[in-house]
Amino acid sequence: MTSEVQAAFPISASALGAALSITVAPHASRTAIERLADGTIRVRLTAPPVEGAANVALLRYLAKTLNVSRSRLSIASGATGRRKRIAVEGMDAEELRARLETALIART
């Protein structure tokens, strides 16, 4: 992984692929992904943070947004908090960065 990827996005290599650090805002008025001024990736979800509903909605949304199967995504850490680390199995950091960049551009 190059330092450029790390500087542009909170992405790193993981044991089985790549990992993305994000902040989640549950119970939002609409579901969307955005990059904040400090470089943080925030995913806003309409699902409430009750009994894992927001986590399920998050993984479904990211699967659709990144064009990967849901089974390749998992929450590596932060399952009960707003800051999460999402593991993407079978994808390197460069590919994850490219797909995330495409998703962010498409939503602006």
Image (tube, grey):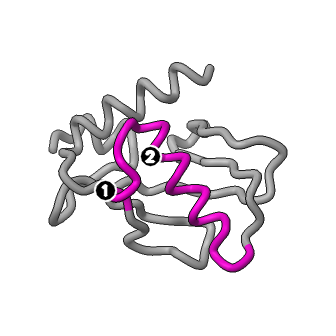
Percent of width and height locating residue 4:
25, 35
Q: Amino acid at mark 2?
A: Ala
Residue 88: image quadrant is: bottom left
Residue 26: image quadrant is: bottom right
Q: Along the horizontal axis of the image, is 88 left or right of 60? A: left
Percent of width and height locating residue 92:
18, 45
Q: Residue at x 60, y 24 (%)?
A: 107
Residue 57, placed above or below residue 81 = above
Q: Earlier in the sequence, mark 2 or mark 1?
A: 2
**Quadrant occupied by the N terminus:** top left
Instruction: Give the SS element for disc 2.
Output: helix
Q: Along the horizontal axis of the image, is 45 left or right of 67? A: right
Q: Pointer 2 and pointer 1: residues touching (CB < 8 Å)?
A: yes
Q: Amino acid at mark 1?
A: Arg
Q: Along the horizontal axis of the image, is 82 left or right of 2? A: right
Residue under pointer 2: 63
Q: Looking at the magenta stretch, what is its main secondary structure?
A: helix
Q: Mark 2: few, some, or many residues within 10 Å (few <14, many ≥20)?
A: some
Residue 101, placed above or below residue 5 = above
Q: Nearer the viewer, residue 41 or 17?
A: 17
Percent of width and height locating residue 68:
35, 43
Q: Which residues are magenta?
A: 50-73
**Quadrant occupied by the C terminus:** top right
Percent of width and height locating residue 74:
39, 65
How many dots with numbers?
Answer: 2
Q: Which mark is residue 72?
A: 1
Residue 96: image quadrant is: top left
Q: Residue at x 18, y 51 (%)?
A: 90
Q: Nearer the viewer, residue 40 or 43?
A: 43
